[in-house]
Amino acid sequence: TQEDADRYFNAYADAINAIAEANKKRHINDASSVSIKLSALHPRYELANTHRVMMELAPRVLNLVQQAKNLNVAITIDAEEADRLELSLKVFAHVYSQLSNYSGFGLVVQAYQKRALEVLKLLAQLVTDHGRLIPLRLVKGAYWDTEIKLAQEQGLKDYPVFTRKANTDLSYLACARFLLANRDKFYPQFATHNANTVAAVYTMAGDEGGYEFQRLHGMGQALHQQTIAKDGLNRPCRVYA
């Protein structure tokens, strides 16, 4: 409901204010950040309501991002279901195009979606057009069962996500390679608890730095104790709570 959306908006604004104090004098890549869910900020976040979403939601997102920019807080647009991907990209591009002198506005891309690499290419073009780096959180995806069931219910001829884990892993590495090859356009953020994936990213990245790993609170501590740079490189691990 709109009442729920307003409550989430206020909660996000409060969260930005709460962590801003600890972010003073820190580079935005090393400071705490906030992840927001667009579907939490609008009661009808669906492709069929694109016009309404762009008129009502996009300005609210811009409001939050401007607040975050002023307080040195990075904001990440979280991922949604596959049928909302185009809408999320539309909102992101609209807000991104109105910002200046701020490299903290990013989003999440799910490697289990078959469009993942094409989405990264689209975003790279967005950076070329506007000249501001995008923090990009790469995940494998957490709603596989839902995506399969929705596609079956709609009688679609194909699925929007890969149906084999090996293909998702391969897609993740292809996306990782693209991000690492374009560190002038992206700040790559690799969210994974998979040791093989971590080792592959570490090897592909070389000694340049300019990226980070991410894990969920309560998971992957032992693994990511090995990823945090101890040789002077800036390679942190962000913990999502």
Image (cartoon, helix red, strand yellow):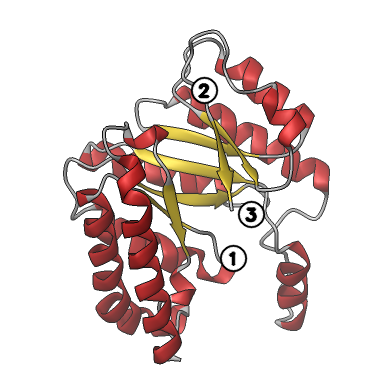
Q: Is residue 180 left or right of residue 223?
A: left
Mark on residue 235?
A: 2
Question: In this image, 199 relative to 29: left or right?
Answer: right
Labels 2 and 1 touching (C-beta < 8 A): no
Percent position of residue 148, x then y: 76, 69
Q: Amino acid at mark 2?
A: Arg
Residue at image coords 70%, 21%: 226
- CB within 8 Å, label 1 to label 3: yes
Q: Nearer the viewer, mark 2 or mark 1?
A: 2
Q: Amino acid at mark 1?
A: Ala
Residue at 63 percent across and 47 percent down: it is: 111
Distance, label 3 to label 2, CA atoms, is: 27 Å
Is 61 drawn above or below residue 2 in the view shown?
above
Mark positioned earlier in the residue sequence (1 or 3): 1
Tell me: 74 left or right of 83. left
> In the picture, residue 60 is in which quadrant?
bottom left
Give the percent coordinates (x, y) of residue 160. 66, 62
In the foreground, 170 or 99: 99
* Residue pointed to by mark 3: 113
- Give the SS element for disc 3: loop
- Tag 3: amino acid: Gln
Mark 2 vs 1, N-terminal side: 1
Residue 229 versus residue 162 in the image, above or below:
above
